[in-house]
Every structure is written in C-alpha cells, then in structure tokens.
Image (tube, rainbow, N blue to C red):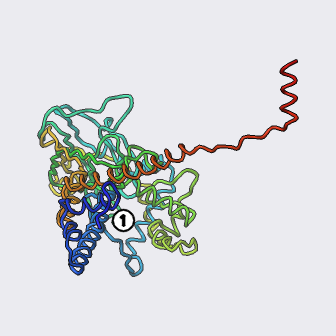
Amino acid sequence: MEEKTGSILGTLREYGENTSAHGIPRAVTTKSLPRRLFWTCLFLASFSYFCSQAYDLVNKYLDYPGDYEDYEDYDYDYDDHHEDFKTANTFMGLIANMNSTTRQAIGHQARDFIQECQFDGRACSPKNFSVFTDSTYGNCFTFNKANGNTAPQRSTSAGPLNGLSLILYIQQEEYIPSLTEKAGARVVVHSPDRWPFPEFEGFDASPGFLTSAGLRLTSITRLGGRYGDCTNGGGYELLYGGTYTQANCLVTCHQQHMVSVCGCADPSFKAPVNTAFCDSVTTTGHGMYEQSKEGNRNRCAALYLSSELLSHVLKKLQTKRGRRPGAGILGNTDRFKRNLLKLNIYYEALNYEQISESPGYEEESLLGDLGGQLGLWVGMSLLSAMEVVEIFADLFAIIFKKFSSKEMKISKKIDVAPREKKDANDLALSYIKGNM
C-alpha cells in the first residue's frame, strides 16, 4: 500500500529511494526483509561511528591546540645540604638584612670595576651605568637602562666596533675563598625595560680572555587568549620593576609562598613591603623553601654558619677598599690574567627574525575532516547534505499545511443559538404601544 502523496511517510520514502547517500536506497527499496535489516543496521552503525568521529573533531577544534610539550615535575629526596651551600646561603641572608647603602658600599664599585667603556664608537664611562644589588653577585651595573627622561642609546651599525666594548677589573684579591668558587663577570643581555636576573640567565666572562657575544633579534608574536595560557603580564603585581617576564613572575610567586608559609622573606630575593627577611644566622631562604613545600611553618629548616667563619667574613668586608689596578698590573702577566678581562657585545646584523604563532587546527581543517569522515562512513557529499536540508524543508511544509487546514476548519464552524420565544402578553403590549 503506497502512502498518499504529500504525506510525511510518502515524502520520507521518496527521499530514501532517490537520495545519493549510500546505503539508504538499499534499505528502502530492497524487498527482502533480511537484506533490508542488514542495510539498515549497516547504515546506522556507520552513521553512529561518523557521529563519534565528528564529536572528537569538534572537541579538537574547540581545544584550540598549539604545538608544545608537557613537562611533569618530579620530587626527589636529597641528603642534607652541603656545608658550602649552607655558608653561601647564610651569607646571602646576612647581606640582605643590611641597608642598601651598606650593601653597595661593601661591593665592587663602578669606578674600579669598569676600566674602559666604548659604545657605537664613542667613549662611555661608569656614569652611564646604573647599579643594583643582587643577593648572589653583589653590585651589578646596567648599561643603557630605560629612563623616562632620556631616550636609550642605539647602535647604528652591526659588528664589534659598533657595539659595547668593556675592559673590566674584577679584583680577585677582594674575593672571599669560602664563598666564591669562580672568578670573572656575569653578563646578562636584556631589553632596557626588563629587570635582569643574573642567577637564572646570562653567561660568564673569564678573566685573562676576550669574550664576544654576537646578538640577533628574534621577535615572537603569540596568539594568546584561547590558544594558550601565555599572558602579556597585565594585571600582575611583580616583585621587581620593569615589564613582565617569566623569571620575574616565578620569583614573585616564590617569595609570596615563602611569606605565607614561613612568615618571612627569602633573602635570595627582594622582600615584599612590610616583610622581614628570614634570620640571616639561623635560617636561609633555600633551606626554608625546601621545607615550606610541606605547608608547615614549624618545618622551616635552620641552617647554621660557624661563628668563626662569620667573624672572618665580616672582618673581610669591613676592611675592603676599592682600588684601581694602575699601570703596574700591565707589567705583571699573572696579575693581568687574574684580574682583567675584555667583553664585546654587538649586533651581528641589524635585521631580525619574525616568528608568528598560527592556529594548529582551523575551520578549514575541521570542515575537511568532517567531510572526509562523512564521505567514508556514510557516503555523503555536500550535495547529499543539501538533500537532507531539502527533506526537512518538505516535512516542515507538510506539517505547517496540516496545522493551517485544521485552523481553517475550526473557523468555518458556526454556532446557531435558538431564537427566544416572546410571551403573548409582550406581543399584545407591543402592538398596543405601536398603535398609540
């Protein structure tokens, strides 16, 4: 028995017989019941697998993937700290509790450290350097630091002659053997508006040698937002000044954790406002941090420095006097190699490399993968999909027409009310009134 033309079942049967999608015509037109069941089950299984693949592909697109590797952190158990480690960290705590004037006074001075300076072919002097104190390296000197009042100096050409050239006097005689295991200068190359962290970044320049560093600029533009966890640093209160950097962020988080767990700041870094450093004699930041991972203030470890070594260190610092090497050092080869070094920092070229991040999975890839899965498992193309849109439009038209015809039938029904019978007296009264 054939369905009526224009009915829902008739429209669906017509679509099943004429569609270009594979499997559906065989399930509809085959007269054998087993074959019809076989093609129906095969189509439903293929369509279900396509839906599963489509779900995975859409989730992959919505994850906004990028090319990166995940690293897992592991905790290791170590033996007790070495004595040299305890000495160095306690010394840092001792220095951290001094005021800034004292800390700078006992460190190397720019006039002694910087013997000769040249930038872009022009002479410079220690006055062109700004100083800050690092807990590990003492007095550090920054050339061409960002200053709102003056524009930064720029190199006009590439090559060693147009970069920064320095001759440094490291004063090894002033080193404290118990605290210093190496000699030389720590060099960090950074942008003028960044705060340097020589403990985490940079390279060493050895005495008695020329050290050259050729630079090339690489500019990286990241997508940010939903394509990753990277940030431009907005909204962060950093412990150190300058623009946002990963090192600055890590140091800030480390110090905040120390203060919240141990109640004092790690002497290795700057202390937050209204926060005291941990006791420089009985405790050190690194030792306390190892135990602060437990989240228990009472487990912040105490590391001791012998009173004999502490007196020796303080005496050495108090008798320290800055002195220039003078011409006599040039005649002493041994002293020359031990105390002088030359450093050249320059641009290898004045061009730069631009690296831009792009989405790893875009809309075109999603549509292509969906089309491939749809064609593989269901045998449908874009035109076959338009047939599905057409059948839904036909079904909507049929349903709309049926509802419209029902409403018209209801509106054509007329309710006839029975006429009221008038009383004979009322008629007589009306007739009398009409003749008066």
User: Which residue sits at x=32%, y=51%?
Assistant: 394
Where residue 28 appears, as percent x and y from the top left, is 23, 68
The answer to whether residue 101 is above or below residue 175 is: above
The answer to whether residue 128 is above or below residue 310 is: above
Q: Mark 1 highlights which residue?
A: 179
Number of residues whose C-alpha sits closer than 10 Å to that of mark 1, classed few (under 14), some (14–19) or many (20 or more)? some
Where residue 226 appears, as percent x and y from the top left, is 36, 52
The answer to whether residue 263 is above or below residue 436 is: below
Kindly tell me whether residue 40 is visible in this rendering: yes
User: Which residue sits at x=35%, y=71%?
Assistant: 73
Kindly tell me whether residue 314 is visible in this rendering: no
Q: In screen coordinates, is 270 left or right of 144?
A: right
Quadrant of the rendering where the C terminus is positioned: top right
User: Which residue sits at x=14%, y=37%?
Assistant: 350
Question: Which amino acid type is marked by label 1?
Answer: Leu
Nearer to the camera, 425 or 413? 425
* Quarter of the view holding residue 430: top right
Q: In screen coordinates, is 64 left or right of 332?
A: right
Where residue 113 appears, as percent x and y from the top left, is 29, 46
Where residue 429 appears, as percent x and y from the top left, is 88, 29
Nearer to the camera, 327 or 248? 248
Q: In screen coordinates, is 19 left or right of 64?
A: left
Quadrant of the rendering where the N terminus is positioned: bottom left
Nearer to the camera, 323 or 164? 164
Label 1 element class:
loop
